[in-house]
């Protein structure tokens, strides 16, 4: 595929090579590259279209002795997503030669960097239907959630004492609420129905005159349910309460417009939409104005709400990811829905006693959470070692407890332990989905063969009626 | 600058050829699929300006794919289980 084309000047090969010589990769950079070094440029002459530069460089091979020879398939799109090549392409200049600080006002390094940052800001704003003055860049959705919950609460603490959230929120929101409780706030953790969706009647009943904020995530990262944010927004607007939504899993995947949804604060994460890790943003409404007390003290960047140098390459990546997501949303959604239906049908038609957690009508199709009865979740994950999956969210996977989200939707303890989350993304192929479904069914059947509980169920014994004796 | 039919075809073929060079399975499959679907959808478009815009995007994508193929070759990861 790659032919080594040496540089030929007047019939004689150019002996010197421009880069370190090692075996491995020889590639053709392109026929229009002029050498940046003047001496070589003279040698190469003025016409460059006939000559190609051969460069040999040592490729970095990532596997080490511990790594497997073959890499597993990636079906964990809710944990993170790969960088889209277009995003990396947009970021590269700012990782190499355009390294200025966007807050430097006195030279062109700074001006270029600032221009890129403002372009990215506009791209993010266009995706969510906001104005670019309402976008604050942060280090990720966790920081955005922290600023929303703690920042809003602390600013309005003179008159307000109450915050409402749900039991299925992300850990960072729940933990921020716990911190507020230590500061003297009251927090209501609304329960969810078995479909995963919060009841609007419960929410109405819970709002008090001293409620400062309601925080409900748009798309749940473990079961994929989409909350009725528009209706919740109407309720909150009528009662003059701020609505914050963690839209990290929703932005770029389903249409989100902050005007329609009546949302006052929204968190966005870069690495969930094929952008870089370490960047996110917070939408803060200006009309009616939402005031936030800053958590990071410093030079007053980002309208005083988040001090610190804005990382230009990362925000450029985030902006590019948002623009690409807006363009590709319909195409991706149609494809992911098709693949998702295929995966679920393929698994559920070939094995029994499987529960699809979450509301079937109000779910994002790319997040599928299945509970396999009479199979232990960890052992199924270990058996499916060729596919990268997870049972529950990445931030809780280190602990032994079953997922609190599944517990909140009323899944029984044993079913909560046996659940696997499949994440389908833009780059997932049909072959990967088929392979995953086949392997999953195969291992579920194998593990059930070994299970004595399964034997008893096959014989028709009702497991709930058994009196287990204590030893 | 309106592109003639032959130029559009050659752009399409170049895009497919460059997309095949990706070393990462997921990127490669996505690029090939997206190029095919994009040109198929664009073929039926009646709006001239829309077609122009998409062809412009396609042109820029060609250069981008060449660059990203190079980066992918520099930082390779081992083959996925499904490629074996």
Image: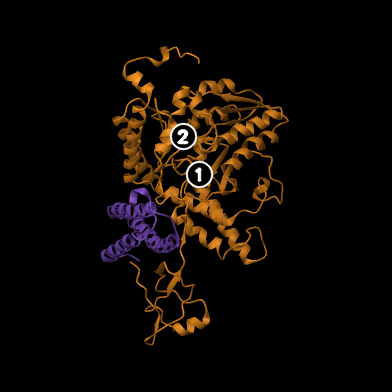
Chain colours: A orange, B purple
Task: Tell me, yes or no, if residue A262 can be seen here.
Answer: no
Residue at 34% x, 44% y is A432
Q: Quadrant of residue A367?
A: top left
Q: CA distance from mark 2 to mark 1?
A: 34 Å
- Looking at the image, residue B47 sits to the left or right of residue A80; the answer is left
Helix, strand or loop status at disc 2 = loop
**To which residue does mark 2 refer?**
A391
Mark 2 on the same chain as mark 1: yes
Q: Nearer the viewer, mark 2 or mark 1?
A: 2
Residue A254 found in image quarter: top left
Can residue A457 be spotted in the picture?
A: yes
The percent position of residue A15, horizontal first and vertical second, equals 44, 82
Residue visible at 55% across and 51% down in the picture: A121
Q: Position of residue A55 (x, y in %)?
A: 44, 72
**How many tags in the picture?**
2
The residue lying toward the viewer, choosing from A267 and A433, is: A433
* Chain ID at mark 2: A
Q: Which mark is residue A129?
A: 1
């Amino acid at each position: 595929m790659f032919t080594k084309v040496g540089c030929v000047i007047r019939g004689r090969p150019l002996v010197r090579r421009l880069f370190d010589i090692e075996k491995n990769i020889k590639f053709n950079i392109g026929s229009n590259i002029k050498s940046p070094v003047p001496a070589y440029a003279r040698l190469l002459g003025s016409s460059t279209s006939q000559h190609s530069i051969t460069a040999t460089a040592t490729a970095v091979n990532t596997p080490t002795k511990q790594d497997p020879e073959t890499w597993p398939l990636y079906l964990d799109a809710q944990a993170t997503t790969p960088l889209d090549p277009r995003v990396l392409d947009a970021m590269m200049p700012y990782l190499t030669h355009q390294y200025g600080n966007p807050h430097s006002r006195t030279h062109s390094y700074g001006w270029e960097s600032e221009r890129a940052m403002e372009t990215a800001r506009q791209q993010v704003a266009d995706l969510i239907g906001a104005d670019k003055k309402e976008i604050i860049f942060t280090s990720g959705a966790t920081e955005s959630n922290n600023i929303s919950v703690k920042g809003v609460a602390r600013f309005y603490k003179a008159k307000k004492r109450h915050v409402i959230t749900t039991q299925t929120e992300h850990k960072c929101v729940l933990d921020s609420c716990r911190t507020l409780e230590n500061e003297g706030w009251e927090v209501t953790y609304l329960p969810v129905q078995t479909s995963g969706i919060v009841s609007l009647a419960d929410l109405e009943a819970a709002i008090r005159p001293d409620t400062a904020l309601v925080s409900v995530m748009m798309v749940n990262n473990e079961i994929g349910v989409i909350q009725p944010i528009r209706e919740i927004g109407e309720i909150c607007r009528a009662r003059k309460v701020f609505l914050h939504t963690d839209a990290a899993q929703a932005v770029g995947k389903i249409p989100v417009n902050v005007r329609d949804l009546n949302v006052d604060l929204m968190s966005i994460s870069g690495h969930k939409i094929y952008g870089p890790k370490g960047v996110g943003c917070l939408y803060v409404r200006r009309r009616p104005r939402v005031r936030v007390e800053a958590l990071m003290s410093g030079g007053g960047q980002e309208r005083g709400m988040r001090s610190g140098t804005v990382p230009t390459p990362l925000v450029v990546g985030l902006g590019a990811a948002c623009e690409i997501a807006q363009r590709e949303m319909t195409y991706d959604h149609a494809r992911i829905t098709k693949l998702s239906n295929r995966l679920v049908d393929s698994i559920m038609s070939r094995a029994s006693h499987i529960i699809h957690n979450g509301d079937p009508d109000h779910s994002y199709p790319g997040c599928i959470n299945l509970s396999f009865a009479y199979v232990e979740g960890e052992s199924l994950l270990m058996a499916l070692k060729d596919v990268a999956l997870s049972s529950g969210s990445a931030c809780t996977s280190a602990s032994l407890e079953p997922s609190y989200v599944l517990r909140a939707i009323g899944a029984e303890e044993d079913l909560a332990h046996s659940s696997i989350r499949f994440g389908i993304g833009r780059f997932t192929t049909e072959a990967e989905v088929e392979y995953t479904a086949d392997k999953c069914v195969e291992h579920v059947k194998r593990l059930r063969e070994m299970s004595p509980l399964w034997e008893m169920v096959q014989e028709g014994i009702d497991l709930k009626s058994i009196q287990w004796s204590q030893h | 600058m309106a592109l003639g039919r032959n130029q559009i075809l050659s752009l399409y073929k170049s895009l497919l050829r460059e997309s095949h060079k990706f070393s990462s399975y997921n990127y490669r499959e996505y690029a090939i699929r997206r190029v095919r679907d994009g040109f198929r959808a664009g073929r039926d478009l009646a709006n001239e300006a829309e077609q122009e815009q998409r062809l412009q995007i396609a042109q820029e994508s060609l250069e981008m794919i060449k660059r990203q193929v190079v980066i992918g070759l520099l930082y390779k990861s081992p083959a996925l289980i499904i490629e074996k």
